[in-house]
Amino acid sequence: MVCRRDGDEPEKGWVVGEFDDSLIVLPEQEAQGLAALHDALQATTTWADLLTSIENHPDLLREVRERYDEELPEESETFNPDEIRGFTEGDWPEHPKERMIGSIPASIASLGVVGPTLFGEGLLQIAPDSRHEVMHRLRQLGVSYREDDGLISRACGAWRYG
């Protein structure tokens, strides 16, 4: 498993929360972006709605454009997330448990195990009872964090599983 080295400059703001019996640890900006994307995928009815919902997240806009196999439809056309390559299969958007591999500090990743999946490289599972130790290690790294199970649930796409 490749992880960010603890000596690397970490993101300044992190969010910690529980979803699907696992602890999720993400940079705040990434969690906000994933939550906005999932909110948009769930609620938008036109392409214009989708693009407006994620316009403040250029990386996500780029991902949508790259994953749509053709030129994006007219903004007035009906939006269906199933039309985006990988969505129906669960391959996109990448799950935070997969995103954490390689992006969270090694001292935090070491608290979890990578479990197998049908697609991708695996999912990092951190037991919820490790929450206080995760927060302790974030403090040791000198980064700010906050707890927000609601944001993490939205970032994980809870609406798809409910």
Image: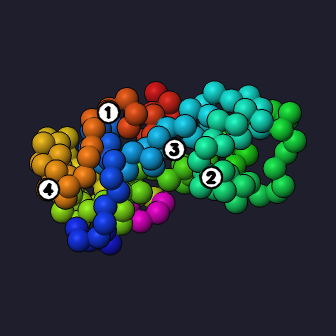
Q: Name the residue under label 2.
A: 58
Q: Mark 1 packing: few (<14 Cα in 10 Å), some, or many (20+)? A: few
* Mark 4 to mark 2 CA distance (whole Å): 31 Å
Element type at mark 3: helix
* Mark 3 to mark 4 CA distance (whole Å): 26 Å
Task: Tell me the residue at 25%/52% (across/down).
Answer: 143
**Mark 2 touching mark 1, by CB under 8 A?**
no
Q: Mark 4 packing: few (<14 Cα in 10 Å), some, or many (20+)? A: few
Q: Mark 4 points at which residue?
A: 140
User: Of the numbered discs in the image, which one, if any, rests on residue 74?
Assistant: none
Q: Mark 3 packing: few (<14 Cα in 10 Å), some, or many (20+)? A: some
**Prevailing secondary structure of the magenta residues:** loop
Q: Which of marks 1 and 4 is in front?
A: 4
Specify whether 140 is left or right of 93: left
Specify whether 157 is left or right of 26: right
Question: Which kind of residue does numbered mark 3 sit on?
Answer: Gly
Q: Earlier in the sequence, mark 1 or mark 4?
A: 4
Question: Which kind of residue does numbered mark 1 sit on?
Answer: Asp
**Mark 3 touching mark 1, by CB under 8 A?**
no
Q: Which of marks 3 and 4 is nearer the N terminus?
A: 3
Residue 148 placement (x, y as % from top left): 32, 33
Question: Which kind of residue does numbered mark 2 sit on?
Answer: Pro
Q: Which of marks 2 and 3 is nearer the N terminus?
A: 3
Q: Name the residue under label 3.
A: 33
Element type at mark 4: helix
Q: Earlier in the sequence, mark 4 or mark 2?
A: 2
Q: Name the residue under label 1.
A: 148
Question: Which kind of residue does numbered mark 4 sit on?
Answer: Gln
Quarter of the image where one finds residue 56: top right
* Mark 2 to mark 1 CA distance (whole Å): 24 Å
Residue 82 placement (x, y as % from top left): 68, 42
Magenta residues span: 119-123
